Amino acid sequence: MGSVVVMGVAGCGKSSLGGALAQASGLPLVEGDDFHSPASRDKMNRGIALTDADRDGWLATLGDALRRHPHGAVLTCSALKRAYRDRLRTASPGLRFLFLDIDRAQALQRVAARAGSHFFSASLVDSQFATLESPLGEAGVLRLDALEPIDHLCASAMAWLHAKETS
């Protein structure tokens, strides 16, 4: 099946779909948040948006993680800019992206609801939307409605990934 990135702004459900997809596909899950540096985590916790420079080492590490799984992996990563997605594509040729599309109000509600258990500050949701360069129109991208139930999202993603595999 190859590797796939579950992407989108904070609160869209990357970790939930990534976990379900990894289980359904038998591929390892690479949780992008686990690879942020302590300094980046601290910045986000304090409501300070990451810069391209902050994300540089993180993207390099995620690219290395993809290379360590030549038979495929499910990576959760915001992948907000085209340049970030292109770096990951370079690390894993044929990489596909599942874009969990959500509106600002719903993302803010979800991020605020997990405030006690996640390092990401709800005050950063607007910066996520400001940074997002929509992947729609890029090759190997499927848009999914982030508000759909996880089992539906997983089934849609699996069908798309398998269809791409046989075409």
Image (tube, rainbow, N blue to C red):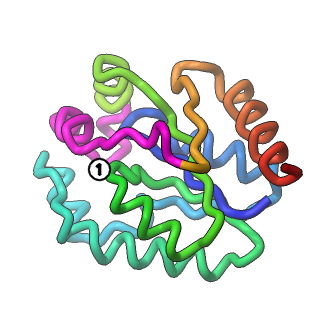
Q: Magenta stretch: dominant SS?
A: loop
Residue 23: x %, y % from top left: 77, 50
Q: Quadrant of residue 69?
A: bottom right
Q: Is residue 126 magenta?
A: yes
Residue placed at 51% from the left, 81% from the top? 64
Residue 89: x %, y % from top left: 52, 67
Residue 152: x %, y % from top left: 72, 24
Q: Residue furthest right?
A: 166
Residue placed at 48% from the left, 46% from the top? 7
Query: Is 22 or 92 nearer to us in this picture?
Result: 92
- Quadrant showing the N terminus: bottom right
Residue 160: x %, y % from top left: 75, 39
Direction from residue 133 to residue 139 in the image, left or right: right
Q: Secondary structure at mark 1?
A: loop
Direction from residue 34 to residue 125 in the image, left or right: left
Q: Quadrant of residue 85?
A: bottom left
Q: Is residue 139 above or below residue 145?
A: below
Direction from residue 69 to residue 128 in the image, left or right: left
Q: Which residues are magenta?
A: 114-138
| Residue named by callout 1 | 119
Residue placed at 59% from the left, 72% from the top? 92
Q: How many marks?
A: 1
Q: Is residue 65 above or below residue 83?
A: below
Label 1 Cα neighbours within 10 Å, binned few <14 / some 14-19 / many ≥20:
some
Question: Looking at the picture, which amino acid does disc 1 mark?
Answer: Phe
